Image: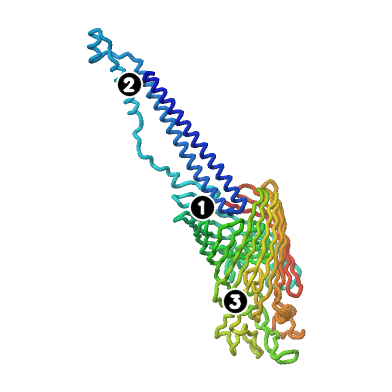
Amino acid sequence: MNFPQQMASTINRLCAVCAFSALTLAWSHARADETTNALLDLLKAKGAITPSEYDNIKARQQVEAKNSAQKLQAAETRAREAEAKAREAEAKLRAVEAAPKPATGRNAVAQANGQPASNNTLTEAQTRAMTLSAADEAVPTKALKSPVEYVTVLPNCIGIRVGEVDICTKGDLDFFGVENFPDKNPAAPTITGGLANADPHNAAAIRAGLLPSSIQLSLATHQAGMDIGAYLGVYTAGNDVFPQAANANSSGSPIGLGTPGIDFRQFYGTIGTPTWGTVKVGRDIGLFASDAILNDLTLFGVGSVPDNAAPSNTSLGRIGLGYIYADWIPQITYKSPTIGGFTGYVSVMTPLDTHATNPFFAAVTATGSGCTAVPCLVSASSGDPTTNALFTGHDAPMVQGKLSYVNAFSPDTKLTLSTSGLWQRQLADCTGANLSGGLCVLNPVVTGSGLASPVLNPNAVVDSWAVDGFAMLDLWGWNFVAYGYTGKAVGTTGLFFNGIDAFGDARRSDGGYLQAAYTFNNVLTVGGSWGVSRLETANAVDNTFVFEQCTSTGPLGSPMPPNTSAGTSCLVKDNSSWIGFARYKLTKWVNLQAEYVYTTAENQIGQRIHNSAIVAGTTFFW
């Protein structure tokens, strides 16, 4: 075999090796991706990893696959370029070989002497051709790293990877048109803490739903063998606010020159590993009742709107109508690894004050007719705007915990179970201003009456606690939810709202909701729910005291003094609602939702208020 044939054979083998290498690399990547995907799906189905962990791993896998594909494409391009240059060199070699060359030097002398020329001519031509071909090749240099290795697009969020850090932004835009139809009974009772309203006029508003609009930023990286993250969420509703006890969540102020509220409800950091779990430090949603609100399908809608004439930052959804608001609380929380589908959480949080929304008429001591004990408690008006003692002292953090179980039996069947609870110690916070005779005076003495207000021991302590249970079944397009809770001194609607009576005794709370929905073709979801939240009086004394408030009567049914305002307020007993809704997924980002909401509030003597609302609007998610 002569030199050109050897050269051609070598080139062909080189091309075959390049092609085989590229195919082998592509096949190996494809097989690895298939194996990894199958393993991830199996781990998720068995509950060994959470949906969020699954999504994070898939996101990293997609980024790495994209990088591998780009590197493979670059390798294939270089192989094709090498093949083309090799064939070009072969063509030049053949051209040199075929061209007649004049004899020079020793070959010319040999020809003049009648001798054949040597093979040196061919050898020199081959050498020149090979030298020319080598000169045509680019001088190899150290390849610069592609910017794609430092900045890449992240899937499932608007974000990039910069070096070892994933920067992700998400958010939502949430607005609904709401028409509220209040109870128009001119003699409708006043139900303090009630979530239905009475008014002679309907109320219209363009407002946020249960979920306000938001922009959220997360940072995630891996350092020293640990996953580290930081998160910030900024929320707003678009309606003008009027700062009160609940800040932007108080009733709004729909007047000119107003501004909306900004709610920095989420900012925290996390550090952990898949082996020993994750610690979160910062402000985030509480554990107790979190599954109740996060799986309430009015989260993407509106629910009850007693404040529609002056919208607050958000609507209520089912807050106070099936569950107590989980709230956003500064905390240090530990989350365990998921083992066999079970995940545990434990947290210490900033304790919250008790809060009362019900103005009441201060109980007083008396020794006159009608008392079976000396002294006994009767009612007199004080105008003090609080119903419960000054339980604002905290010598320990609030403690919350949660245990959840998730099992995906098949792609169309998943069961979620959880239970959560909280405990907080409430201390009577008495100061010199409200101490009288060694007792903590709840309200000032009624001017000119000579009668004292309710009192309690300044060392009084109340332990607030609550537990709940949550179950959700996703089955062939159906979604079923059942939730219930119970507790003492935990209040209703908000944590510790009206949970302690005027004498320092704990009131009982309970409630829950049921929900069912069906999704057609992954775009249209239709469903409904019913829920109730109840608040009981603490004991017979509290019951009598509240009854006197509600009925404008004094001891033994006698009329209240003429200068009092008794009967203008009556503590809520329960709030309930029926909600029907339909949600249409217009695009990956845009959802449209419509609702009909019927809400009932009942006070402690059985009087009721009803109102209804119709809702239509949209939520953008990105």
Residue density around tag 3, few if under 14, some if 14–19, many if 20 or more, within 10 Å: many
Q: CA distance from mark 2 to mark 1?
A: 60 Å
Q: Are marks 1 and 3 in contact (CB under 8 Å)?
A: no
Q: CA distance from mark 3 to mark 2?
A: 98 Å
Q: Are marks 2 and 1 in contact (CB under 8 Å)?
A: no
Which one is earlier in the sequence, the residue at label 2 or at label 1? 2
| Residue type, numbered disc 1 | Cys
**267 relative position to 554: left or right:** left
Which residue does the image show at 62% across and 75% down from the upper left? 463
Q: Nearer the viewer, mark 2 or mark 1?
A: 2
Residue placed most toward the observer, 589 or 344: 344
Query: In which image quadrant can residue 208 be found?
Result: bottom right
Question: In this rendering, is residue 329 above or below 119?
Answer: below
| Residue type, numbered disc 2 | Gln
The disc at residue 168 is: 1
Tag 2 residue: 126
Tag 3 residue: 426
Question: In this rendering, is residue 200 above or below 516?
Answer: below
Which residue does the image show at 59% across and 50% down from the upper left? 43
- Describe the element under mark 2 as helix, strand or loop: helix
